[in-house]
Image (cartoon, rainbow, N blue to C red):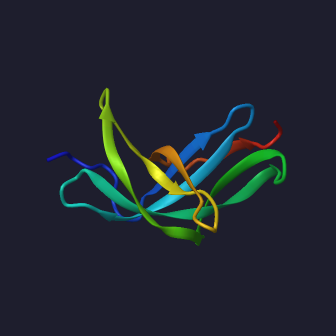
């Protein structure tokens, strides 16, 4: 059985983009007893500095959830745990694949200027 570092209530983040930096956040709502998957729900984000339409810093907003709950697979590489899988990208449950890490509690920079 794998040791799962993530626990219920943890916030995970994924940063991606080519020419832009887009951050996504989700919250862990369950951990499978096998340790192979975790159940999550997407959460919103809040701009704390900069121009919210183009660039700045943001933090997760757990008060705003969207999409249906989804599973992420637990992976480990070089002593580091990360979580991969398809997840809702928009309010209408459009999906995308991502790789999440545990959010370290610091604001993340974003840039929507391509």
Q: Is residue 13 in sight in this rendering?
A: yes
Residue at 63 percent across and 68 percent down: it is 92
Residue 44 percent across, percent down from the top left: 63, 63
Judge left or right: residue 33 versus residue 21.
left
Among the 4 quarters of the image, the one containing residue 18: top right
Judge left or right: residue 54 versus residue 19.
right
Residue 34 percent across, percent down from the top left: 18, 55
Judge left or right: residue 30 versus residue 85.
left
> Is residue 9 placed above or below 73 in the rendered structure?
below
Residue at 69 percent across and 39 percent down: it is 21
Residue at 74 percent across and 37 percent down: it is 20
Residue 107 percent across, percent down from the top left: 64, 48
Judge left or right: residue 29 versus residue 94.
left
- Farthest-out residue, left: 1
- Farthest-out residue, bottom: 63
Count every numbered label the image shows and give the total. 0
Q: Is residue 107 in sight in this rendering?
A: no
Residue 29 percent across, percent down from the top left: 39, 67
Among the 4 quarters of the image, the one containing residue 93: bottom right
Among the 4 quarters of the image, the one containing residue 88: bottom right
Where the C terminus falls, by quadrant? top right
């Amino acid at each position: 059985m794998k040791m799962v570092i993530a626990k219920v209530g943890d916030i995970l983040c994924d940063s991606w983009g080519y020419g832009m930096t887009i951050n996504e956040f989700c919250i862990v709502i369950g951990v499978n007893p096998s340790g192979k998957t975790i159940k999550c729900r997407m959460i919103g984000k809040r701009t704390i500095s900069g121009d919210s339409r183009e660039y700045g810093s943001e933090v997760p907003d757990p008060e705003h959830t969207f999409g249906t709950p989804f599973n992420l697979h637990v992976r480990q590489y070089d002593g580091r745990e990360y979580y991969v899988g398809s997840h809702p990208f928009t309010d209408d449950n459009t999906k995308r694949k991502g790789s999440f890490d545990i959010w370290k509690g610091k604001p993340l920079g974003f840039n929507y200027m391509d």
